[in-house]
Image: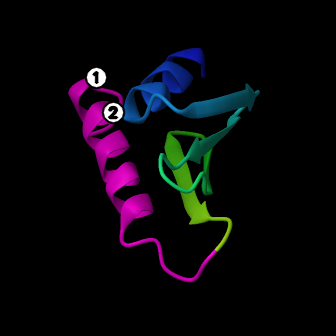
Amino acid sequence: MTQLAELVSQVDARTNISHEDDKLHAEFTSRVFGFVDDLDLIIDNNTIHVRSASRTGHYDFGVNRRRVEKLRSILKEQGIIQ
């Protein structure tokens, strides 16, 4: 889980990460307006469940999707996922 937390911090430097057992929670803060987005990862057997959402607003211009895709590519590079 510590390795996963380090990889999540590579996605964005402005990240607050907490984890316990098989759950990881990260809060990303936007540069301009200071909006906070949440990222939750839960490891269940050999599966990583991902939830990424904005706390405020109705549309995030694809920021959360790009963030998850960046994390996915980092996890692939490290050989953690296929």
Q: Is residue 18 left or right of residue 46?
A: right
- 26 w.r.t. 40: above or below: above
For label 2, the residue is 75
Residue identifier under label 1: 78
Q: CA distance from mark 1 to mark 2?
A: 5 Å
Depth order, front residue of 24/63: 63
Task: Please tell me which residue is depicted at 57% across the width and 33% down the height of the picture.
Answer: 15
Question: On the rendered image, what quadrant is the N terminus found in?
Answer: top right
Q: For residue 72: magenta?
A: yes
The residue most toward the front is 32
Q: Residue at x 28, y 23 (%)?
A: 78
Taking the magenta stretch, the answer to whether it contains residue 30 is: no
Q: Tell me the quadrant of the picture where the C terminus can be found.
A: top left
- Counting the numbered discs, the total is 2
Furthest-right residue in view? 20
Judging depth in this view, the residue of 75 and 38 nearest the camera is 38
Would residue 66 be visible to someone looking at this image?
Answer: yes
Up/down of 63 relative to 25, above or below: below
Instruction: Using the image, tell me which numbered label, if any, was put on residue 30.
Output: none
Comparing 16 with 35, the one in front is 35
Picture coordinates of residue 39, whole percent (x, y): 59, 50
x, y percentage for residue 52? 55, 59
Q: Between 81 and 69, which is closer to the camera in this rendering? A: 69
Residue 71: image location, x then y, percent: 36, 41
| Residue 43 in view of the camera | no
Kind of residue at badge 1: Gln
Tag 1's secondary structure? loop
Local packing at callout 2 (Cα closer than 10 Å; few below 14, some 14-19, many 20+) is: some
Residue at (46, 28) in percent of width and height: 13
How was the colour assigned to the protein in this rendering? Answer: rainbow
**What amino acid is labelled 2 in the image?**
Leu
Residue range in magenta is: 57-82
